[in-house]
């Protein structure tokens, strides 16, 4: 991907501001390489949750700040590639959240919040998924809507792609992945490729997401020695 990246060439139309999608941001060979490196990761590096497992690379983001750690060399080259796009303003990505989603796993709708520079960039590996976006539940008694009624739009995210979310798509709308084994494509999904018509059914496999972000508040690790 050239450093002359023009985001308007990749903007997803007919969704709130702003979402950008780059197909084949990495090659099949690079995807195979990344999957191989992930498979070699010792189990102790993973945090196991009820519906997925994950790794924090570069440190653990917290409200008080992140103690910065080196990102593994096999991963850093892809972080640099995203940094070349200048999507974090004058900052650079310094953190990667690696999630593993097996078929039937997902994540509840959420906002990433103010721990991060307000941009999400995600490289997908292994399998597709569909990310749904929802209006927030403000708890008003009148006119309360169910989660499905609050859905604003959905995006099909395929392997080797890069998805970038900014502005309202970062700050305003919740995003989540349903816990299903098969996705049925409907008219609410933006920017469907021509080879996948409405009504298509796609079985999910194991997907890995590399969410590459900037944590503004960091510090270097300090060691305290006895007196």
Image: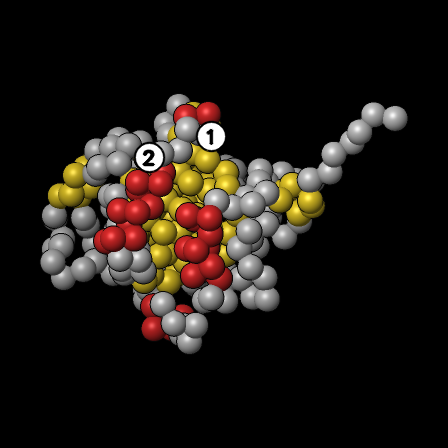
The location of residue 37, given as percent across then percent down, is: 35, 40
Residue 45 badge: 1
Q: Residue furthest right?
A: 227
Please indicate whether residue 70 sits to the left or right of residue 54 in the image.
Answer: right
217 left or right, relative to 53: right
Q: Residue at x 15, y 43 (%)?
A: 202
Mark 1 lies on a secondary structure that is helix
Question: Which residue is painted at 37% across and 56% down in the image?
Answer: 163
- Whether residue 118 is visible: no
Mark 1 neighbour density, 10 Å: few (under 14) some (14–19) many (20 or more): few
- Quarter of the rendering occupied by the C terminus: top right
Between 138 and 132, the one lying in front of the other is 132
| SS at circle 2 | helix
The foreground one among 78 and 209 is 78
Is 39 situated above or below 111? above
Looking at the image, which is closer to me, 105 or 58?
Answer: 58
Please, is residue 112 above or below residue 106 in the view? below
Regarding residue 56, the answer to whether it shows in the image is: yes
* Residue identified by numbered label 2: 39
Q: Is residue 105 left or right of residue 4?
A: left
Judge whether 193 appears above or below 178 on screen: below
Image spot of residue 206 (x, y percent): 26, 36
Measured in 3D between alpha carbons, the distance from the residue under mark 2 to the one under mark 1, in whole angstroms, is 12 Å
- Foreground residue among 140 and 172: 172
The residue shown at (20%, 41%) is 183
Residue 169 on image: x %, y %: 44, 55
Quadrant of residue 149 within the rendered picture: top left
Q: Which of marks 2 and 1 is nearer the N terminus?
A: 2
């Amino acid at each position: 991907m050239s450093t002359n990246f023009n985001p308007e060439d990749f903007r997803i139309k007919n969704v709130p501001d702003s979402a950008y999608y780059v197909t084949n941001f990495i090659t099949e060979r690079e995807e195979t390489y990344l999957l191989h490196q992930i498979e070699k990761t010792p189990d102790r590096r993973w945090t196991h949750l009820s519906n997925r497992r994950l790794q924090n690379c570069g440190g653990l983001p917290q409200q008080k700040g992140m103690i910065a750690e080196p990102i593994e060399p096999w991963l850093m080259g892809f972080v640099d590639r995203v940094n070349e796009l200048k999507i974090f303003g004058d900052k650079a990505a310094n953190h990667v959240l690696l999630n593993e989603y097996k078929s039937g796993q997902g994540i509840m709708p959420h906002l990433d919040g103010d721990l991060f520079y307000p941009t999400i960039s995600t490289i997908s590996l292994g399998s597709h998924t569909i990310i749904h976006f929802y209006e927030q539940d403000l708890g008003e008694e009148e006119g309360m809507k169910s989660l499905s009624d609050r859905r604003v739009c959905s995006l099909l995210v395929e392997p080797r792609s890069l998805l970038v979310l900014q502005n309202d798509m970062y700050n305003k709308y919740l995003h989540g992945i349903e816990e299903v084994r098969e996705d049925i494509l409907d008219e609410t999904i933006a920017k469907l490729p021509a080879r996948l018509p409405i009504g298509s059914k796609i079985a999910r496999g194991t997907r890995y997401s590399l969410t590459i972000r900037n944590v503004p508040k960091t510090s270097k690790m300090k060691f305290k020695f006895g007196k």
